[in-house]
Image (cartoon, rainbow, N blue to C red):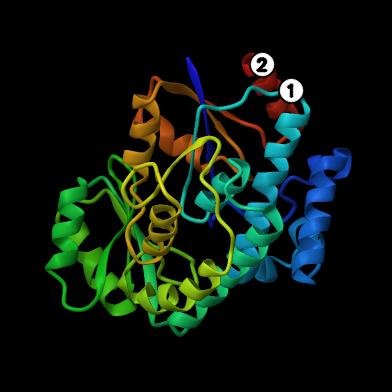
Amino acid sequence: MALGFVFPGQGSQAVGMLADHIRAEPVVAECFAAADQVLGVPLTRIALDGPEADLNRTEITQPAILTASVALWRLWQARGGATPAVMAGHSLGEYSALVCAGALDFDAAVMLVHERGRCMQAAVPEGVGAMAAVLGLDDADVAKCCEAVAGVVAPANFNAPGQVVIAGESAAVDEAIAACQAAGARRAMTLAVSVPSHCTLMTPAAEDFATKLAAVELRLPRVAVVHNVDAMISDSIEALRDRLLRQLSEPVQWTACVQRMVASGARELVECGPGRVLSGLIKRIDRDVRVSAIDSPAALASALESKAS
């Protein structure tokens, strides 16, 4: 039975994340210290002590989550954890997966996702865009509700069956929420985010980010990485770069990504990062998949015991 690793995206951050690991595990603390040095900001202090408003700034959130995820991966390796056969990351988490799979150097990735966050924030003025979670409707029904609305709004994250996130212009998102509720959605509510990710409003961000991405050396991953935009695995650097750019303005196909990992033989998945958002989604996608988290010392010990090489 193959092992897979999944890496969370924005929204999994919390003040105090990985505090026990940072204080007890030198490999984790060293990873955060390296990110502090790269960015020239006290990322470790912000992650441990906040304030929350600073941690939730997109250009800080993204390197913080990537650093936490890579630190946990290095700790997993240092403890003799088994090597996965496949990886995937949700949105920002795709960059964490690429670092851990050997496709992207950590220092370069920290600065790259910092710039990614800056490009995303600059693309849409605060208050112009919005995102909302829709629960209890089929993917196709959510898409139809968005299509019926004037303005820019579309599915942004296909997170699990019956769980879709939409993104677009604030007024259009509000109208789409009402349409989804009228169509029978169990819940539909706006999310506390600063940018409308994975929709066409991010096209300017992709154009800005393209020059940053072009300047970074990429390699083909040593471990297969399933991409968000199409649940495929790149066979060239050009394809990898293209999929990372498209990811900014196209929806995250998370359900399809997990299904692709399972189809490849990965029936055991480890969530490698702060929080356990992906663990919950994976259980909704496939109840037969075993999912472990490693964000606390106890969780790490349990996962290592069951999956040690």
Disc 2 crowd rating (10 Å Cα; few below 14, some 14-19, many 20+) is: few
Q: Nearer the viewer, residue 74 or 43?
A: 74
Residue type, mark 2 in image: Ser
Which label is found at residue 309?
2
Q: Is residue 257 left or right of residue 9?
A: left
Q: Nearer the viewer, residue 71 or 128?
A: 71
Q: What residue is at 71 percent from the left and 59 percent from the top? A: 107
- Give percent across and percent down for residue 277: 51, 43
- Give percent across and percent down for residue 263: 34, 25
Which label is found at residue 80?
1
Q: Is residue 125 left or right of residue 137?
A: right
Kindly check if marks 1 and 2 are in contact, taking CB atoms under 8 A apart as contact. Answer: yes
- Give percent across and percent down for residue 139: 21, 48
Which label is found at residue 205?
none
Quadrant containing the C terminus in the rendered view = top right
Disc 1 crowd rating (10 Å Cα; few below 14, some 14-19, many 20+) is: few
Q: Earlier in the sequence, mark 1 or mark 2?
A: 1
User: Element at badge 2?
Assistant: loop
Residue type, mark 1 in image: Gly
Q: Is residue 249 left or right of residue 64?
A: left
Q: CA distance from mark 1 to mark 2?
A: 6 Å
Q: What residue is at 41 percent from the left and 30 percent from the top? A: 283
Q: Tag count in the figure? A: 2
